[in-house]
Amino acid sequence: MEIKAVVSALAALAQDSRLAVFRALVQAGPAGLAAGRISELTGIPPSSLSFHLKELLHADMVSSQQAGRFVIYTANFSTMNELVGFLTENCCGGNPCTPVCTPACVTEKEST
């Protein structure tokens, strides 16, 4: 993932409402949510929600698809996984991590 894309994704998520929207879409899974349902779940008024969705779309963190008269938004899981991969690619100083990477890796000094 290129640095510009990383910065764009992190900037989009670095706001309360957008983070809440993204988390709701992650929880919804691949089926996604209509904008009205996102508004209900997050408490964000529709007039503000469209701005936040636009920012997330621009950062490629979400995608949208027309479904009849509704627009369904889904989390872009590939971008999310690339972002997490970028942030953790040098985890543990190049040493193998446990199968489930924990927030804090054990240093060589701590393991002896």
Image (cartoon, helix red, strand yellow):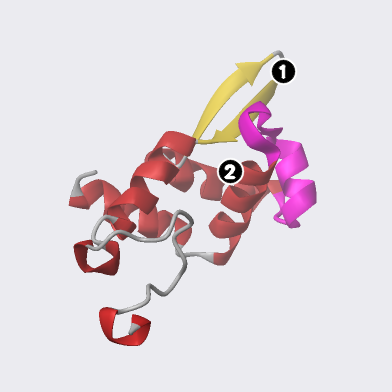
Residue occupying the point 43% across, 44% down = 80
Dot 1 amino acid type: Arg
Dot 2 amino acid type: Ser
Q: In this view, does 69 lie to the left or right of 79?
A: right
Magenta span: helix, strand or loop, mainly? helix
The disc at residue 69 is 1
Residue occupying the point 53% across, 50% down = 52
- Is residue 83 one of those drawn in magenta? no
Q: Neighbour class for label 2 at 10 Å: few (<14), some, many (≥20)?
A: some
Q: Neighbour class for label 1 at 10 Å: few (<14), some, many (≥20)?
A: few
Disc 2/disc 1 C-alpha distance (Å): 16 Å
Q: Is residue 10 left or right of residue 68?
A: left
Q: Which residue lies furthest to the front in this view?
A: 112
Q: In which quarter of the image is residue 74?
A: top right
Looking at the rendered structure, the secondary structure element under dot 2 is helix
Judging depth in this view, the residue of 85 and 68 nearest the camera is 85
Is tag 2's residue or tag 1's residue first in the polypeptide sequence? 2
Residue occupying the point 72% across, 55% down = 42
Residue 73 in the image: x percent, y percent?
60, 32
Q: In this view, does 56 lie to the left or right of 24?
A: left
Residue beneath label 2, please? 50
Height in image: 80 above or below 93?
above
Judging depth in this view, the residue of 82 and 42 nearest the camera is 82
Mark 2 touching mark 1, by CB under 8 A?
no
Residue 59 seen: no
Q: In this view, does 67 lie to the left or right of 14?
A: right
Residue 53 seen: yes
